[in-house]
Amino acid sequence: MQDLVIIGGGINGVGIARDAAGRGLKVTLIEKDDIASKTSSWSTKLIHGGIRYLENYEFRLVRESLKEREVIKKIAPHITKPIRFVLPHVPSLRPSWLIRIGLLLYDWLGGVITLPKSRFVSLQEDFKENPLKDNFKIGYEYSDLFVDDARLVLLNAEDAINRGANILTNTSIVNTIRNKNDWEISLNTGETLKSKVIVNATGPYAVDVLNSLFKIKSKKKLRLIQGSHLIVNKIYQGEQSYILQLNDKRIIFLIPYLNKYTLIGTTDHEVDSYENPKITNEEKNYLINSVNEFIKTKICDKDIVWTYAGVRPLVEDFNEKASKITRDYTFEINDTLAPILTIFGGKLTTYRKLSEHALDKLSNYLNFPNKSWTGKEILPGGNIAIKSKLDIPENMIARLENIYGDKIYKLNEYFLKLDNGGEKISEDLYEYEVKYLVDEELVKTADDILFRRTKLGIDFPTNLKEKLNSILKRHL
C-alpha cells in the first residue's frame, strides 16, 4: 500500500515526490512519457521573481518567488547561474519613476538576497558591446537566476528515488477504482497499485485527467497559454541579458545560451490543445520583429537554429490578455471517498513551496512529520566544491561539470569501465555518458538524452542519430 501516488513527472510532481519521500511516506510517481518531457522543459529557463507581476499587484507571488530564487540558488548551484538583466528605458511605455519604484520593490520584497541589487546604467558606456540601437540611451539593471529546467526536474526525481520513492516513466494508467479508504490503480504494465491518496500533477492535462480517468468534474478552469522561444546564433558578446518592453505591454527576454546562442522568448499565445505544441509563423515573426525594434543588427529566419514551444496551464481568472493571467497556483481536493488532490497552475520558480503547501493539505489524510526540509538539502551533484583527479579528457570536463556537478566523479567511473569512454558517437558525446544516463538518470530514448539530460540536441548531427540509437539499445 502506497501512501501517495503522484501522476505527472513535471516539476510539481517530482517536487512533491521528493518532499513526501523525505518525510518517510511511501511514494510512487507515474509519468506517461519522460521526466520533464512537457511544460517543465520548455520554459525560458529562469528562476525569477517575476518583475512584471508587480504591475498586476501580485506581491505575495513575487515575494515567494524571490525567496525561492535564493533557496534554489543554494540547493542547485551546479545547474543555476546568476544573470544580470538590462532593461532599456522606453519613455512612451513606463516613466522612469515607475521603473525605479518597481525595482526597489523587487530588491526589497525578497528579504535578504545574495544577488546584486538593481542599478541605473548608461547603455552606451557600461557594456563592452551594446547591441541596442543608439536611440536607447539609459536603462536599468537587475538580477535573476538562470537554470537548466529539465535537469532541475530530473534532480528532484533522483533525490526522491534516493529517499525511497518509486518513479515510473513511460507508464500509463489504464483504470482506477475508488474505495472509501484507498485507490486501486491499474497500469499498462499489468501492475496494480493501491494508494491512500492520489495527487494529480499533470499540468495542462489536469482538468481532462480528473474528468476522464477519475470521473470527477472540477470547479476550476484552465487556460492553455503557449510560450514559444527562438534559439538564434549569438546576437552579441557579453554576459548581460536583456528584458525588452514592447508596445503591447508584454516583455521579451534576450539571454546568452550555451556559449554560442541567444535565447529569445517568450510569447503568450492562447491555444485550444496541449498536445504537440509548435511555434507558429505568427509567433516567430512576432519575436523577430520585436527584437529588431531594439537591436542594431537585425535578425531573420536564417539566424534561427532551433525553436521550442510549451503549454502553460494558467488558472482562469477572466483576464482578457493572456499576459495578465496570474502565474500563481491553487489546489482542489475531492475527498468524498479516498482523497485526490489536484494542482492547478504554478511556475518553475515556486515548485518547492507549492510542494510544501500540497503536503500541508495532505496532512489531513496522511500521518507524517510536519517539518520543512527541502530548502536545506542540496540536490544531487550540488556539492561542487569537491575536487579530485579525473580521467575524463580535459576538453570534455567543462560541459560535464555544468551538467552533472560533482556527479562527474560517478561519470568518471563509467568512463573507465568502458575502456576510456567506449565508442565515440559525436565530438561531444561518447558511449560512457549514454550508459551513465540509462543506469542513473532514467533515460529511455535518444530525445531524453539530447534535449533533456543534455542540450546537445540543438546542433546534434542528424546522420549520427542512428548511431546514438544503436548504442542506446545496447545499454537499455
Image: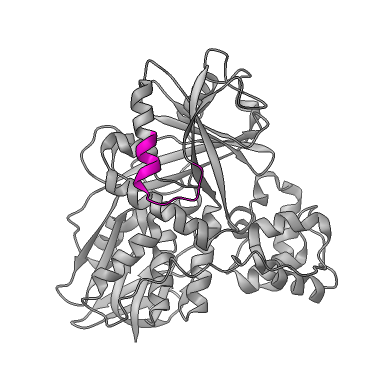
Name the residue: 34% across, 46% down.
Answer: 109
Taking the view exactly as shown, the residue that stands out farthest to the front is 112
Residue 320, can we see it?
yes
Q: Quadrant of the N terminus?
A: bottom left
Q: Depth check: 87 or 446 in front? A: 87
Taking the view exactly as shown, the residue that stands out farthest to the left is 336
Left/right of residue 474 with respect to residue 361 in the rendered view = right
Residue 87: x %, y % from top left? 48, 28
Residue 50, can we see it?
no
**Residue 319 occupies quadrant:** top left
Q: Quadrant of the C terminus?
A: bottom right
Residue 101: x %, y % from top left? 34, 31
Residue 274: x %, y % from top left? 39, 48
Name the residue: 39% across, 35% down.
Answer: 103
Name the residue: 67% across, 27% down.
Answer: 128
Which residues are drawn in magenta?
103-116
